[in-house]
Image (tube, grey):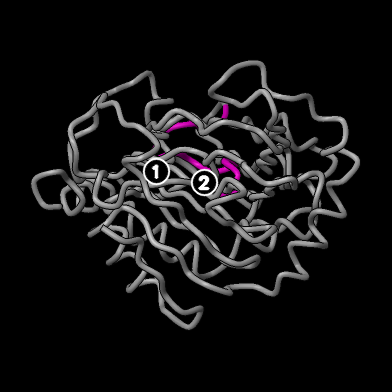
Amino acid sequence: MPIGHLAASAGSERVAELLERDGCCVVDGVVDAALLDEIRAELEPYLATTPLGPDLFSGRRTRRTGGLIARSPKARELVQHPLVLETVKATLKGATNFQLHLTQVIAIGPEEPAQPIHRDQWAFDLFPFPKGYEVQCNTLWAMSDFTDENGATRVIPGSHRFDDRLSFKESDTEPAEMGAGSVLFYTGALYHGGGANRSSAVRYGLNITYTRAWLRQEENQYLAVPQAIAKELPLPLLRLMGYARGAYALGYVDDLRDPIDVLRPGAGETGLGDFGRADRRAREGSPESV
């Protein structure tokens, strides 16, 4: 099955439709490639000092640089991109809210072999989530052109509906080729992996992922972003980072305080969330109704 491509003018409903059908899609030319160049320039000091991965999965010729909200003001634009947030909301059906899961530049160096094919949601202790119940929605922005030769991420369209813990080879996958400024959307249940880089240049991709807010974040935003920086960020971004209750009641502070009050006293809501509303949303997004 080929990877679906959409124009940048496609709305979030159409992107979400392809994610439900195929588990992935590419939206071409969403932002100007110059924005990705600016982000890379902001991150260059950190990219240069990030160590190579220690194993085959993380890539011994691959650097993974995180902490992008603190390190790259321009990257915050992608974290909060309207098309992305609207698509995540539509994909994570029934969630009271969702949160930022990780921010990471993945720089695959020359001669890096293909990454083992996996599901990102295996990070949650390999828990077998029900088929059709998506807990994670991911984006991978092309900072440089993604080609079959330079390690374009490889996916198996439709595999978000497959059984869990399956094994695949690189030949079972399709490369998500796309130009700089384009974005690959894929769900946490999709089988995928970084491609082998057979070129002489580094392939740069910017991975920003989102999860239901009752799951633990892969990248700890409270520590990755110092409070001195966090206090200056807009409220919607702070809530997306996790300064909000997960679901309707998780993560409050001391006497039922809204987490946002820690950074912005008086900006939060009092008490617990709305259980009735959370219950209705959960029923709408239950595995039986998906």
| Other residues around mark 1 within 10 Å, as few (<14) / some (14–19) / many (≥20) | many
Q: Is residue 29 magenta?
A: no
Residue 274 in the image: x percent, y percent? 33, 48
Q: Secondary structure at mark 1?
A: strand
Residue sitting at 55 percent across and 52 percent down? Answer: 140
Task: Check if mark 1's residue and mark 2's residue have beta carbons within 8 Å.
Answer: yes
Residue sitting at 54 percent across and 29 percent down? Answer: 255
Q: Quadrant of residue 17?
A: bottom left
Q: CA distance from mark 1 to mark 2?
A: 7 Å
What residue type is disc 1 on? Gln
Image quadrant holding the N terminus, namely bottom left
> Count the marks: how many?
2
Q: Is residue 229 shown above or below 116?
A: below
Q: Quadrant of residue 220?
A: top right
Query: What number is the disc on residue 162?
Result: none
Asked whether the viewer can see residue 236, the reply is no
Residue 241 in the image: x percent, y percent? 60, 44
Q: Residue furthest bottom?
A: 9
What residue type is disc 2 on? Thr
Residue 248 in the image: x percent, y percent? 37, 42
Write down the residue under mark 2: 209
Q: Secondary structure at mark 2?
A: strand
Q: Is residue 209 left or right of residue 283?
A: right
Specify which label sits upstream in the sequence, 1 or 2: 1
Please report the bounds of the magenta region as a residue range: 239-253
Write down the residue under mark 1: 136
